[in-house]
Image (cartoon, rainbow, N blue to C red):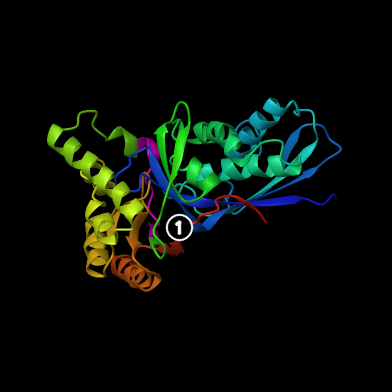
Amino acid sequence: MQPGIKVFAPASVGNAAVGFDVMGFALEQPGDEITVRFSDTPGLRITLISGAQGKLPYDPLKNTAGFAALKLLEHLGETGRGIEMELHKKMPIGSGLGSSAASAVAGVMAINELLKRPLEKKDLLPFALQGEYLASGGWHADNVAPSLMGGLVLIRDNETMDFHRLPMPRGIYATVIYPHVEVLTKDARSILSDAVPLKKFIQQSANMGSFIIGLYNSDISLIGRSLQDVIIEPQRARLIPHFYEVKEAVMKAGALGCSISGAGPSIFALSANSLIAEEVGEAMKRVYAQAKIEHDLYISPINQEGAIKC
């Protein structure tokens, strides 16, 4: 067996409370790993999938990582190249943490590394986004872009993939809890109203603008005051058991802000330092432990590197 190239792509928190479909940030953990190696058999083959409990297809045309990789190979004129791919899911599927985005990113990153980096990292985004589209049916880069590039990312325009990294003050940590309940992305989107009251639009715009000002000025207090989603969160909260109990508990524990990660059911909070982030995590866990709902907890600084070769 030929030696392989292994790549890790991290989970991400989409929307970041005030930036629905246009903002997201990367976590250090969890994430997906993909290993690729050359093969004597022409074409891309997925030979192993672990950690997915049989939920993911081996057909590259139906697999997020495989499809994204195929689109990159098509662009490079390398579809006849023999390549074997192994996908190791090290994060929950359907968690609201960008699972499909991480797979797509890892897929294109691994192929690019195997072929000696014919493209710059940022130029892999459109191919990863095609893989994400296969899984979610949405052309939104708020998970894919941070998983690939790291940091907190603002997507000015999803169609042209005009995205920009925003600064994140040092020391800020994310605490994310994933309660083991199912929230389908299509359901989380279907309940959203197309009509937004003018008053809420104004407030949300102000929150997003002041959040960005807080980031650039390292104004922790302003960041905390701005992390309020008045449009999407109130509509989706009912899909997540005990959401408001968790939010109340983490704010009492000292979090800057708290909201839904992506379409849910994961809930994230940002804190000014790791100590508060751990206390926030304990507060989250207590709510779901009392409700007898199984859960996973992740505490992480903002991942500034994104996808990496291992």
Q: Nearer the viewer, residue 301 or 143?
A: 301
Can residue 242 be seen at all in this image of the molecule? Answer: no
Q: Residue extending furthest front? A: 217
Residue at 60% of width from left, 36% of height from top?
Answer: 124
Q: Is residue 17 left or right of residue 34?
A: left
Residue closer to the observer: 72 or 30: 72
Is residue 184 magenta-colored?
Answer: yes
Task: Check the image and report above or below for 143 versus 137.
Answer: below
Q: Give the range drawn in magenta.
A: 176-187
Q: Position of residue 1 (x, y in %)?
A: 85, 50
Q: Determine which residue is flagged by label 1.
A: 302
**Residue 200: in magenta span:** no
Residue 12 seen from this side: yes
The answer to which image quadrant residue 71 occupies is top right
Taking the image as shown, residue 103 lies to the left or right of residue 285, namely: right
Q: Using the rendered view, name the quadrant where residue 175 is placed.
A: bottom left
Could you say which quadrant of the image residue 80 lies in?
top right
Q: Which residue is drawn at 26% across and 41% down?
A: 232
**Seen in the image, is 54 located left or right of residue 162?**
right
Q: How many marks?
A: 1
